[in-house]
């Protein structure tokens, strides 16, 4: 890439004045990533990620740091006490249990908020959430190292229960910020009978004050989140930065196919009303109808149950879940209409009935255009190729998008694997992502 | 039908000498069934069936008389003590727990054996097994009523644990007769820890003497079993008698489709290796390949499990069971070959793998041709239409066929429903079936 570009960018980012040669020596050679050197310290970010990965490490090599369990609580104490404190952040825990580390700004301006989560699914990986959380702290640490004062106050956030591996619903911390709870959610117990109030208290939250977690439109100048892609698009394309266009809407439909259970030995083939054959045609049709038009929409049948599910009884009914995701609800609605038409044909030809009803709808959350532009420009300024792409997974960013400008930065997941001990993001990509976050934060501050 | 035929048949069957007018008055009018009047007493058979149905009756209206449980034991004591004793049978319990009621013959000849079972699946019906068992006793009772001596000794049998709803394997009594047990089977415990030895003892069996249940080729002149069809072929065709050509062979195959589990939001459609889509194509192909050639073969996928079976993860693997049934093993082998070829195409086009391995094979048991002829002729002689057909379900007859001539008589199941509280065989059909059994037994005895 163009080395001259590098100099200009650093100057523009008000970073060039101090320590340039020190961090140049410590970082990856530019040749390894195709990028200009970083302001952030890749070695420190890596050391912090590796230190965090000790919390909840399993014999299989995964991380089980389920929200509001002891490994999560210990990890949060470690990040607050060691990493955030070292970065000079003023750390508090909000009533939902989210950790917020604040760095003051020169002017009386809304906060620039950035971060992610550190809770994991069972047997998850060490980068999902952790990268965005520790990169956020690294950004502030770098500001401190460089002696940079910003106009806006900065807040690093580590959200509470993003994954929803405990109590079944994720994005807890960010939902608390916008006041979005399910009826009865704050009075639930887990499988062991633990009240959610006590679970949240175990990481320092306080549901009796939950309303104090709310923020208003205007409180947050911008929200940024760096995250591993979790899909394989960037890895396959060999592009290090994804500029998220938005977080897809997700609609789930409960489907029940009702045929007639009967003896598999005594019922002639033409007389059958086999619910599984009809359901199977539908599974194939979900894939076909999803792919019938161009775009990056996805459609999945991940859950399916056969009744009575014994080898010698013709299936009497099948229950399955269709999940459709896209940035456009209109596209999702078009796909399900086509699927319903196919279902009607399958039911008629097999003497079965099919019911399809939506059970949950998460609206798409589009990234804020000017923030997308900031990320794209800063990636380019750092000599990095980037790709506009949807986020097929949900993130806390989608809740914050309701009250503040939102942008997300993706870095590649090797082979697109996530929620697995085999999840991997290359160290050079963690550094690149952190650097783009750093540059974007400074660009927003200058705005 | 031809009433004159009736008189001739009775004479030929050596039944005409006594009581002709008595049972004529008691039975269904011939017009109701299209048949000549019966020698057997339909009202008595019905009363006995209704009395037996009180044992294990459930609130849902079904019968739960699982083998070797108290309702089974009580029902067996009732049938032995009340019904078989009244018919003048000399009753014993063999070491497997099967009830055998003997009536001596005039000559030193092998026994003519007929009967069925009275154990049920949970929430089964009142005719499956019970009809063949009580019709067998009714045949002997009619012989006694009519004062008929036969050349052969007659034995009514009520087999032990036909259904296999307890200890998982059926045809226990008939397998004991031919000495066919699985390794370790006679030392198993049920889910409650009850040893099979004690379960069998609860109905009067004695596993320590199990070898005494064995019979040799030549011991049995013929085995006959009357049973409800359990399918809907006779009911649909409006034909009251099925002449069983044989009991189908059953081969089960365990199929594992292995794809790649991945995030349903972040994995683009073209990059997926969705095990459920591949499995769905296979389910449809099992049906298509089974029906590709003429015949009454059946192929079923009744059991299917998705892993990990959550809405937002692309299925990584699917396990399913294919079951194929036909009277010809060659036909079954041809069908699975075609299914395997289709599976190979599906795997190749989806980047998944499919393994198909046979897990159990039950060879077909063909009915003995001269016994089929006897049944067909006696049905015709009684003025009844009959249909040659396979038995798609397993029956004790298939074990006895290994050592003796075997024939089975089917009567219609309304709508083909069985193993359900909704199982129904019309009273006139129970009587018709019993009458054909009676006539066939006499015809065999004359042979």
Image: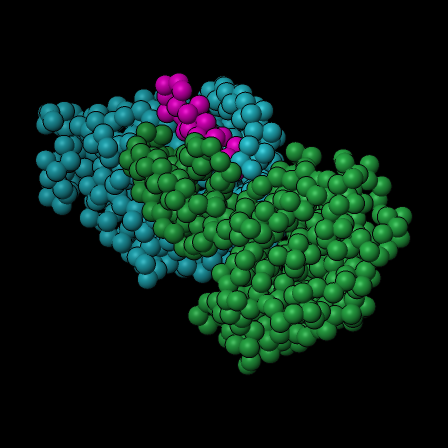
Chain colours: A cyan, B green
The answer to whether residue A335 of the structure is visible from this angle is yes
The quarter of the picture where residue A185 lies is top right
- Residue A438, given in percent of the width and then of the height, sits at 28, 35
B430 and A282: which is toward the camera: B430
- Which residue sits at x=56%, y=29%? A350
The answer to whether residue A213 of the structure is visible from this angle is no
- Which residue sits at x=34%, y=24%? A372
- Which residue sits at x=56%, y=73%? B213
Count of marks overlaid on the render: 0
Point out the residue furthest to the bottom here: B208
B91 and B355: which is toward the camera: B91
Q: Is residue B195 above or below residue A251?
A: below
Q: Is residue B423 left or right of residue A126?
A: right
A376 and B347: which is toward the camera: B347
- Residue A186, given in percent of the width and then of the height, sits at 61, 47
Boundaries of the magenta span: A274-300
Q: Is residue A72 above or below residue A441?
A: below
Q: Quadrant of the N terminus of chain A?
A: top left
The quarter of the picture where residue A272 lies is top right
Q: Quadrant of the C terminus of chain A?
A: top left
Q: Does the magenta portion include A53?
A: no
B110 and A100: which is toward the camera: B110
- Residue B398, given in percent of the width and then of the height, sits at 53, 56
Q: Is residue B303 left or right of residue A442?
A: right
- Which residue sits at x=61%, y=36%? A258
- Residue B166, given in percent of the width and then of the height, sits at 59, 64
Q: Is residue A149 left or right of residue A189?
A: left
Q: Is residue A352 above or below residue B421?
A: above
């Amino acid at each position: 890439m163009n080395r001259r570009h590098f100099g200009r960018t650093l100057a523009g980012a008000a970073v060039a004045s101090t320590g340039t040669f020190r961090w140049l020596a410590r970082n990856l050679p530019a040749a390894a990533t195709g990028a200009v050197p970083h302001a952030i310290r890749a070695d420190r970010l890596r050391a912090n990620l590796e230190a965090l990965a000790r919390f909840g490490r399993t014999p299989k090599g995964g991380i089980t740091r389920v929200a509001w369990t002891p490994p999560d609580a210990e990890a949060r104490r470690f990040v607050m006490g060691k990493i955030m404190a070292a970065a000079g952040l003023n750390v508090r825990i909000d009533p939902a249990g989210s950790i917020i580390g604040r760095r003051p700004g020169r002017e009386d301006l809304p906060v620039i908020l950035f971060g992610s989560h550190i809770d994991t699914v069972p047997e998850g990986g060490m980068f999902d959430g952790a990268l965005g959380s520790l990169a956020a702290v690294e950004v502030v640490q770098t500001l401190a190292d460089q002696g940079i004062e910003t106009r806006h106050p900065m807040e690093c956030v580590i959200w509470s229960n993003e994954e929803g591996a405990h109590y079944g619903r994720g994005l807890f911390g960010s939902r608390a910020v916008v006041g979005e709870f399910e009826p009865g959610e704050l009075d639930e117990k887990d499988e062991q009978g633990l009240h959610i109030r006590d679970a949240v208290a175990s990481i320092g939250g306080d549901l009796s004050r939950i309303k104090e977690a709310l923020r208003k439109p205007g409180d947050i100048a911008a929200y940024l989140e760096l995250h591993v892609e979790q899909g394989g698009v960037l890895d396959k394309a060999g592009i290090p930065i994804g500029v998220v266009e938005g977080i897809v809407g997700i609609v789930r439909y409960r489907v029940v196919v009702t045929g007639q259970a009967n003896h598999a030995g005594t019922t002639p083939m033409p007389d059958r009303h086999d619910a599984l054959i009809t359901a199977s045609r539908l599974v194939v049709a979900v894939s076909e109808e999803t792919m019938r038009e161009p775009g990056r929409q996805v459609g999945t049948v991940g859950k399916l149950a056969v009744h009575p599910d014994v080898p010698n009884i013709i299936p009497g009914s099948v229950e399955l879940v269709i999940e459709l995701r896209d940035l456009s609800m209109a596209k999702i609605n078009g796909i399900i209409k086509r699927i319903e038409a196919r279902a009607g044909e399958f039911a008629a030809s097999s003497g079965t009935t099919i019911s399809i009803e939506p059970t949950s709808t998460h609206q798409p959350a589009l990234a804020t255009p000017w923030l997308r532009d900031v990320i794209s420009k800063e990636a380019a300024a750092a000599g990095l190729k980037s790709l506009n792409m949807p986020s097929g997974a949900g993130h806390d960013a989608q809740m914050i998008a309701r009250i503040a400008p939102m942008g997300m930065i993706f870095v590649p997941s090797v082979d697109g694997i996530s929620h697995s001990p085999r999840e991997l993001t290359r160290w050079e990509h963690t550094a690149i992502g952190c650097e783009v976050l750093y540059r974007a934060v400074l660009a927003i501050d200058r705005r």
